C-alpha cells in the first residue's frame, strides 16, 4: 500500500503541497501543450499504395534464384540453404544433367512460413539464392504462397554479378574439363610418378 | 400526475416483490434499484422533485452501488442460489403473505379517496426548512456522519 | 409543430443530432489522435475518411452478437442499455440554445448527477455478469472510481448553483450574461473537468478498462452491437460532459455575432478536442493514485472552493 502523494516527512507542509501541484498540474499542463503543438508538425505517414516507400537494396524481401553470367542456373542443390533456414521452409531435390552439372529438380519455398531472415542467402555457396527489396507478396489463398522454381528463377544474376561457381570449381562439366577452371592447375597424373 | 403516481407505485410494488423472490443476489439488487427509482417517481408525482432526485442520487446511485460492490467481493455462485431456493418454500411465506395482504386491503380501504392536493415543493423550500427550524437536526445528523467517517478512517488506518 | 422547448420535433432532432455527433466523434477522435501522434489517422473511406464511421457501424451491426454461455444473461444484456439510456436522458435537461432543449427542469443539475450515478450500474453489471476475472476487476475499479468522483463532481457544481441560486441549467446559462462562471469558479471548473473525465472513464482515467492491465476491463466479453453501445455510450458521455462544461462554466450558447447554436457547438467542440488531447498526452495513473488524488486533493479543494464561494456570496449580500 504505497501512497504516492505522501512524501518524506522532512519537508514542510507547504513544500509538499508545492510538489503535489507540480506533479499533478504543472507537468501535465506542459505535456498537454507539447502534444498540442504536434498538430502543426508534418506527419510521418507514407501514403503507401500511391506513394511508394524508398527501399534499400539490402532489404530482405522476396527470394529469387539467380543465374550465373553464362545464363546457367547457379543453384547446385547443395541443400545448405534448406539446412540453414530456421523455419524449414525450403524444399529441394538434387538432380544432374548429362554433362554432370548439378541443379535442383524442384525448388520450393513456402513463403507463408518464411521469416525473411536472409540466412539462406548467407549460407548459399554460389550466391544462387538472394533476397530482394520487393515486399508486396500478399495472397488471398495460403496455397498461393508456396512458390516453385519456375516462380523463383530469374533470368539475370541478381545482386552479385560476378559469381560463377563452375568456373572456379574443379568439377568437370560440359565444355570445361578438369584443370580448366579459373586459377586451377592442370590435374597431375599420379601414376606417372611411379618408378 | 395521478397516473404517474399509480404507475410508479405499481412498478415499485412489483419490483419489491421481485426483490424478495429472486434467488440471484445481483438480480435482486437490480430490482431493488428499480424499486427505489419507482419510489423516486412517486415522490416526484407527489410534488417533491428535490426528494425524488435525492432518492435517485443517494439510494439508487450511491448506496446500492456499494451493495453491488460488496456482492462483487463475496463471489456468490450457484451454491448461494440453491440455498436461497431452499429458504423460500411455500409454507414459510404463505401465511405471512396472506396476513400482509389483509392488512394491505384494510390500508387501501382506509385511504381517503379525495383527490390528491399537490403543490410542488422545490429545493429552495426544502433547504429553507432544513436550515431554518430544523438546523439542529441537520447538524446532529452531520455529527453522526462525521463520527462514521472518522471511525471508518480509523479502521482503514489500522 | 412548433419550435419550442419540449416539442416533439425538438426532441427528435436533438436525439438524432446527439447520436450522430457521438458516432462521428469516433472518426474525429481517431483523426485528431493521429495528428497529435504525427500520423494521419483514418483517411481512406470516403472524403477525409468521413465514411469510416459508416464502415465501423456496418461492422459492429453485422458482427455476431454473442453472449458467453457462462455469463448471467439478465445483467449482461441490461448493462449496455443502461449507459445509453442514462446518458441520453441526461441530455434532456441540457439547454442548447434559446428554445432548443427538451425540458427546463428546476432540478436539472441534480438530474444530471443522478443519471451519472446510475451510469455506474452499467459498468458494474457488465463486469459482474460477464463472469470473467478481468471484467470483474474492471468493474470493481469502476465502482470505486465512479462513486468517488461523483462526490467531487457534485461538490464542484455547487459553487455555480450557489451563484445562480437555481438548479435549472437554463437559468444558469442566463445568469452568465454578465460574465462566464469560469472566472469566479475556476477551481470548480478544473475539478469538474477532472471528475468529468473520471466519470466517463475516458483516458487518462480509463482505469476500469485499462487494456494493458486487464484486457478491456468490464467489456472484455462484449462483442457486436452490445460492445457498440458501450463504445458509443462513451462518446455520448464525452459530448455530455463537454456540453455541461459549456453550460455551467462557459456561458452556454451566449456569444456575439454567430447564432446561439453555433456558439454552443463551437464551445462544446473545443472541450471535446481538449478531452481528446488529454487522451493523447496524459498517461494513465495507477488505480490507487487516482483514488488518493481524488480523496486527498480534489475533495479538500472542492470543499474549500465551496466554502469561499459561500463566504463571498454572503458578504456581497
Ligand atoms: S529468408 Fe530465412 S526463413 Fe526465408 S527461406 Fe531464407 S532462411 Fe528460410
Ligand atoms: S540455393 Fe544455394 S544453398 Fe540452396 S541449394 Fe542452391 S546452391 Fe545450395
Image (cartoon, helix red, strand yellow):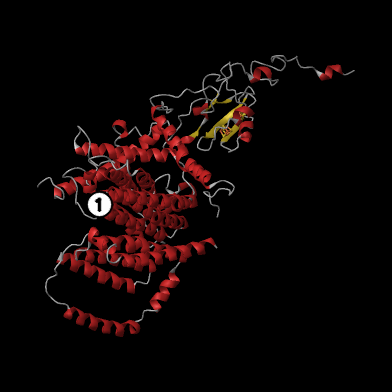
Q: Which of C256 and A65 is in front in this view?
A: C256
Residue C1: % across, % down = 9, 47
Please state if A176 lies on the left or on the right of B83 as rendered: right
Q: Quadrant of the N terminus of chain A?
A: bottom right
The answer to which quarter of the image holds residue B83 is bottom left
Quarter of the displayed picture in which ligand 1 can be seen: top right
Please state if A53 lies on the left or on the right of A171 as rendered: left
**Taking C154 as reference, is A39 above or below it?**
above
Q: Can residue C55 be seen in this view?
A: no
Q: Nearer the viewer, residue C287 or C133?
A: C287
Q: Which of C96 and C33 is in front in this view?
A: C96
Q: Mark 1 points at which residue?
A: C165
Residue C44: % across, % down = 34, 32
Give the SS element for disc 1: loop
**Taking C310 as reference, is C178 above or below it?**
above
Q: How many labels does the image show?
A: 1
Q: Residue at x 38, y 25 (%)?
A: A50
For disc 1, the neighbor class at 10 Å (few under 14, some 14 to 19, many from 20) is: some
Residue furthest to the right: A195
Please state if B41 lies on the left or on the right of B81 as rendered: left
Amino acid at each position: 500500500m504505497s501512497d504516492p502523494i505522501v512524501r518524506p516527512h522532512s519537508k514542510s507542509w507547504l513544500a509538499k503541497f508545492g510538489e503535489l501541484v507540480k506533479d499533478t498540474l504543472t507537468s501535465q499542463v506542459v505535456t498537454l501543450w507539447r502534444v498540442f503543438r504536434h498538430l502543426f508538425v508534418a506527419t510521418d505517414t507514407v501514403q503507401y499504395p500511391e506513394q511508394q516507400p524508398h527501399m534499400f537494396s539490402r532489404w530482405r524481401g522476396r527470394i529469387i534464384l539467380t543465374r550465373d553470367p553464362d545464363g546457367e542456373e547457379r543453384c547446385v542443390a547443395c541443400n545448405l540453404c534448406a539446412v540453414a533456414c530456421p523455419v524449414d521452409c525450403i524444399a529441394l531435390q538434387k538432380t544432374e544433367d548429362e554433362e554432370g552439372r548439378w541443379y535442383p529438380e524442384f525448388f520450393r519455398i513456402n513463403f507463408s512460413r518464411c521469416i525473411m531472415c536472409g540466412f539462406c542467402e548467407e549460407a548459399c555457396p554460389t550466391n544462387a539464392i538472394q533476397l530482394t527489396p520487393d515486399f508486396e507478396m500478399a495472397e488471398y489463398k495460403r496455397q498461393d504462397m508456396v512458390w516453385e522454381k519456375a516462380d523463383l528463377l530469374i533470368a539475370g544474376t541478381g545482386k552479385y554479378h560476378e559469381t560463377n561457381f563452375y568456373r572456379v570449381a574443379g568439377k568437370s562439366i560440359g565444355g570445361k574439363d578438369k584443370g580448366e577452371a579459373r586459377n586451377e592447375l592442370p590435374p597431375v597424373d599420379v601414376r606417372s610418378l611411379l618408378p | 400526475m395521478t397516473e404517474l403516481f399509480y404507475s410508479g407505485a405499481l412498478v415499485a410494488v412489483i419490483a419489491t416483490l421481485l426483490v424478495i423472490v429472486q434467488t440471484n443476489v445481483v438480480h435482486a439488487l437490480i430490482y431493488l434499484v428499480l424499486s427505489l427509482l419507482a419510489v423516486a417517481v412517486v415522490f416526484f408525482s407527489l410534488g417533491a422533485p428535490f426528494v425524488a432526485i435525492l432518492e435517485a442520487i443517494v439510494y439508487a446511485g450511491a448506496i446500492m452501488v456499494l451493495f453491488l460492490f460488496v456482492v462483487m467481493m463475496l463471489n456468490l455462485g450457484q451454491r448461494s442460489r440453491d440455498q436461497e431456493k431452499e429458504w423460500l418454500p411455500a409454507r414459510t411465506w404463505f401465511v405471512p403473505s396472506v396476513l400482509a395482504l389483509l392488512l394491505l386491503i384494510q390500508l387501501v380501504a382506509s385511504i381517503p379517496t379525495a383527490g390528491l392536493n399537490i403543490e410542488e415543493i422545490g429545493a429552495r423550500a426544502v433547504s429553507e426548512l432544513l436550515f431554518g427550524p430544523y438546523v439542529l437536526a441537520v447538524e446532529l445528523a452531520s455529527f453522526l456522519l462525521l463520527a462514521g467517517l472518522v471511525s471508518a478512517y480509523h479502521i482503514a488506518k489500522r | 409543430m412548433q419550435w419550442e422547448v419540449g416539442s416533439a420535433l425538438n426532441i427528435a432532432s436533438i436525439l438524432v443530432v446527439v447520436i450522430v455527433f457521438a458516432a462521428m466523434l469516433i472518426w474525429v477522435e481517431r483523426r485528431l489522435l493521429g495528428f497529435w501522434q504525427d500520423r494521419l489517422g483514418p483517411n481512406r473511406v470516403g472524403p477525409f475518411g468521413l465514411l469510416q464511421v459508416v464502415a465501423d457501424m456496418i461492422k459492429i451491426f453485422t458482427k455476431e452478437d454473442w453472449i458467453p454461455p457462462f455469463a448471467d444473461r439478465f445483467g449482461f444484456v441490461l448493462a449496455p442499455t443502461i449507459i445509453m439510456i442514462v446518458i441520453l436522458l441526461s441530455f434532456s435537461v441540457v439547454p442548447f440554445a434559446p428554445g432548443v432543449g427538451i425540458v427546463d427542469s428546476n432540478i436539472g443539475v441534480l438530474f444530471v448527477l443522478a443519471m451519472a450515478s446510475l451510469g455506474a450500474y452499467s459498468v458494474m453489471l457488465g463486469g459482474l455478469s460477464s463472469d470473467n476475472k478481468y471484467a470483474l476487476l474492471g468493474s470493481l475499479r469502476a465502482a470505486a472510481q465512479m462513486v468517488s468522483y461523483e462526490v467531487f463532481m457534485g461538490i464542484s457544481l455547487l459553487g455555480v448553483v450557489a451563484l445562480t441560486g437555481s438548479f435549472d441549467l437554463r437559468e444558469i446559462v442566463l445568469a452568465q450574461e454578465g460574465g462566464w462562471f469560469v472566472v469566479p469558479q475556476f477551481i470548480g471548473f478544473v475539478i469538474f473537468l477532472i471528475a468529468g473525465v473520471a466519470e466517463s472513464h475516458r483516458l487518462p482515467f480509463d482505469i476500469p478498462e485499462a487494456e494493458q492491465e486487464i484486457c478491456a476491463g468490464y467489456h472484455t466479453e462484449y462483442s457486436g452491437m452490445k460492445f457498440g453501445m458501450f463504445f458509443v455510450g462513451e462518446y455520448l458521455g464525452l459530448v455530455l460532459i463537454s456540453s455541461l462544461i459549456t453550460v455551467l462554466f462557459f456561458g452556454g450558447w451566449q456569444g456575439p455575432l454567430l447564432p446561439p447554436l453555433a456558439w454552443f457547438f463551437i464551445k462544446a467542440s473545443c472541450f471535446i478536442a481538449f478531452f481528446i488531447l488529454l487522451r493523447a498526452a496524459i498517461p494513465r495513473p495507477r488505480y490507487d493514485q487516482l483514488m488518493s488524488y481524488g480523496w486527498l486533493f480534489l475533495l479538500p479543494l472542492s470543499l474549500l472552493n465551496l466554502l469561499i464561494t459561500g463566504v463571498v456570496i454572503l458578504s456581497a449580500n
